Amino acid sequence: MVTTNHQAAVTGDEVELAVIQARALARQRQEQREAQRKRMHARVAGLLCGKRTGPVVARYAMKQVAKWRNKQLCSRDFIDAWTELLKHPKRAAALLREDSPRAVRLRQNTPFASYLGPRDK
């Protein structure tokens, strides 16, 4: 690299460090987004467990999943997973509170968007 008196050469180690720091920051931001999604879905899980609210929320979510299917708005994997889960609202509620890879994945594509705030979707 050509340098002047006012410029310092960037070493390979400095570039590597910058890349590592950028990746760490990206992971941290992703973890923050997932933590927010989990908090918001915990509220939905509470609604799903409610005697009065559970059936209403589950019915709404089933309509959303049907819309995904009919308009091909979502992958078949998500449609099938949510269709099965919503047959058992308390199981769906339990999954929404989990830290499992499956729960993380399903919270990223949720039929409960209208129950979440704009930043939580």
Image (cartoon, grey):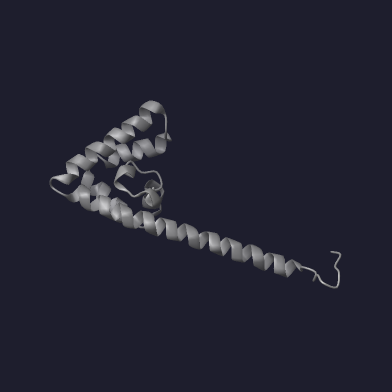
| Residue 102 visible, this angle | no
Residue at (31% x, 52% y) in the render: 41
Q: Give x and y (percent) for residue 24.
A: 55, 64
Q: Residue furthest top?
A: 70
Q: Is residue 62 left or right of residue 33?
A: left
Q: Please state, as top left, top right, bottom left or bottom right, where the N terminus lies in the image.
A: bottom right
Q: Residue furthest left?
A: 51
Q: Give x and y (percent) for residue 76.
A: 41, 34
Report how many numbered discs are placed on residues in the image: 0
- Identify which residue, 97 or 52, lies in the foreground: 52
Residue at (71% x, 69% y) in the render: 14
Q: Is residue 108 above or below residue 29?
A: above
Q: Is residue 1 above or below residue 116?
A: below
Q: Give x and y (percent) for residue 23.
A: 58, 61
Q: Is residue 47 above or below residue 67?
A: below
Q: Quarter of the image holding residue 42?
A: bottom left
- Identify which residue, 106 or 8, lies in the foreground: 8
| Residue 12 visible, this angle | yes
Q: Quarter of the image holding residue 21?
A: bottom right
Residue at (38% x, 46% y) in the render: 106
Residue at (36% x, 26% y) in the render: 70
Q: Is residue 8 left or right of residue 21?
A: right
Q: Give x and y (percent) for residue 81.
A: 34, 40
Q: Residue furthest bottom?
A: 5
